Image (cartoon, helix red, strand yellow):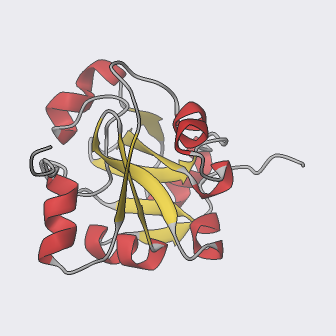
């Protein structure tokens, strides 16, 4: 087997000497984060998906939330200082981020966008996010993720009753 092909996210982490673990799973098309977590055999509550939103101002934002939850758009707008935000249409993800749907990492997008990571990430020593391509996930410390993305933590979701 040849040398592992690095994604933009991995190269950025390497440059900043931030430790991470790579997990690969079979995937040719988009699958949701719950199925990715299950395929990787990792806890769903530690698995996060990367969403891109656009504010009323026209600015783009990156929202990193647990795979089992949905973003609360009013809460996101308040945290971001926007009148309102809406999700970026899936067909625009590649043009805006440089990544494909299902392989969108919060690290290494075409441009650095303001990023918020759901506050539950702070409960864990490591969380799982996309590595920047379908079939590849990275595990890393959430504080280090925030550091590399210039992100802050906030409550982006309404948690479900368990």
Residue 55 visible, this angle: no
Q: Looking at the rendering, which quadrant does residue 55 occupy?
A: top left
Q: Residue at x 51, y 63 (%)?
A: 127
Q: Residue at x 66, y 43 (%)?
A: 69
Q: Is 69 situated left or right of 49 in this image? A: right
Q: Residue at x 20, y 40 (%)?
A: 97
Residue 75 visible, this angle: yes
Task: Residue at the far right: name it.
Answer: 162
Give the image location of residue 78, x and y in percent. 54, 58
Q: Is 15 situated left or right of 117 in this image? A: left
Give the image location of residue 132, x and y in percent. 26, 44
Q: Nearer the viewer, residue 147 or 137?
A: 137
Give the image location of residue 123, x and y in percent. 65, 74
* Number of numbered labels in the structure image: 0
- Tell me the quadrant of the picture where the N terminus can be found: top left
Q: Nearer the viewer, residue 162 or 78?
A: 162
Give the image location of residue 42, x and y in percent. 60, 51
Q: Residue at x 31, y 60 (%)?
A: 114
Q: Is 77 situated left or right of 113 in this image? A: right
Q: Is 28 situated left or right of 153 in this image? A: left
């Amino acid at each position: 087997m040849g040398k592992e092909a690095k994604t933009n996210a991995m190269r950025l982490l390497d440059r900043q000497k931030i430790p991470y673990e790579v997990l690969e799973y079979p995937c040719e098309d988009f699958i949701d984060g719950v199925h990715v977590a299950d395929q990787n055999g990792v806890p769903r509550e530690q698995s996060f998906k990367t969403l891109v939103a656009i504010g009323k101002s026209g600015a783009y934002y990156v929202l990193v939330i647990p795979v089992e939850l949905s973003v609360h758009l009013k809460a996101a707008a308040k945290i971001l200082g926007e009148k309102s935000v809406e999700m970026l249409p899936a067909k625009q993800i590649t043009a805006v981020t440089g990544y494909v749907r299902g392989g969108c990492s919060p690290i290494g997008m075409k441009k650095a966008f303001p990023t918020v990571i759901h506050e539950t990430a702070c409960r864990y020593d490591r969380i799982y996010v996309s590595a920047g391509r379908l079939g590849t996930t990275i595990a890393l410390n959430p504080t280090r993720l925030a550091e590399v993305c210039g992100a802050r933590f906030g409550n982006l979701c309404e948690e479900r009753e368990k």
